[in-house]
Image (cartoon, grey):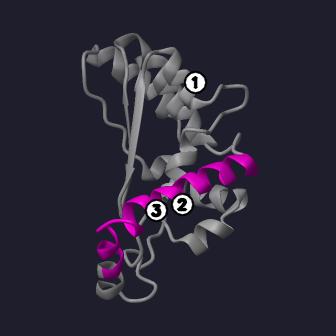
Amino acid sequence: AHLVEHLWVRSVHGTLPKVGEVLEEFGANLNASTASDWTNYMTVAPKDALVPLLKLEAMRLTEPVLGVVEQDVLTEREIVRNELRMRYENSDGSALGYMREALYPEGHPYRFLTIGRHEDLETADVEDVKRFFRQWYVPSNATLTLAGDFEIAETKLQVNKWFGAFPKLAKPVHQR
């Protein structure tokens, strides 16, 4: 899940530039976090960036991994592995991993840290990432939250324009 979080920013749709480049163009800032039950993406942007960012996010939900290639996976995989070393292996964070293994049985989704394990990260390839995206990063499993200085009526129209046409699909099945 954490590898996918990193790759989400690299996602592109057709000729659309990388998400990070679009955010930078509008002076926006993206931050993200991953927990056992969710991944959170938060964008802080000027008011005039709202419509382009809504369009961008809607496009990313239709085929978010279109532009992700093997080199992207290799690059982000090493970044995530270094994060794993720094946050969990070279600090008191290792206790969290041991606690989860002790608390949850084999096969339980909470058993391992969302950042992943080295052995899983080492073998993750672009097809694994695409499967994960297509299973979990779908409109029926997403929540859009907006806060700030914007016109409510106009924003509702824009949200409906960009997100209203998504087909109603079943939510992904969580295996416990």
Q: Please name the residue that numbered disc 3 is placed on.
A: 84
> Does the image show residue 161?
no
The answer to whether the residue labelled 2 contacts the one labelled 3, judged by CB atoms less than 8 Å apart, is yes
The answer to whether the residue labelled 1 contacts the one labelled 3, judged by CB atoms less than 8 Å apart, is no
Query: Which label is found at residue 146?
Result: none
Q: Please name the residue that numbered disc 2 is placed on.
A: 81
Where residue 47 appears, as percent x and y from the top left, is 35, 13
Q: Secondary structure at mark 2?
A: helix
Say whether residue 13 is left or right of residue 20: right
3D distance between C-alphas at marks 1 and 3: 26 Å
Looking at the rendered image, the quarter that the C terminus falls into is: bottom left
For disc 2, the neighbor class at 10 Å (few under 14, some 14 to 19, many from 20) is some
Instruction: Identify the magenta region.
Output: 69-98
3D distance between C-alphas at marks 2 and 1: 24 Å
Say whether residue 15 is left or right of residue 104: right
Q: For the point 43% across and 64% down, which residue is it? A: 114
Q: For the point 70% across and 42% down, which residue is it? A: 66
For disc 3, the neighbor class at 10 Å (few under 14, some 14 to 19, many from 20) is some
Name the one closer to the observer, 50 or 17: 17
Q: Is residue 157 above or below residue 131?
A: above
Name the one closer to the observer, 91 or 166: 91
Q: For the point 66% across and 25% down, which residue is it? A: 16
Q: Secondary structure at mark 3?
A: helix
Where residue 113 appears, as percent x and y from the top left, is 40, 69
Name the amino acid type tagged 2: Arg
Name the amino acid type tagged 1: Glu
Query: Which label is found at residue 21?
Result: 1
Q: Closer to the observer: label 1 or label 3?
A: 3
Say whether residue 29 is left or right of residue 7: left
For disc 1, the neighbor class at 10 Å (few under 14, some 14 to 19, many from 20) is some
Asked if the stretch drawn in magenta spans residue 169, the answer is no
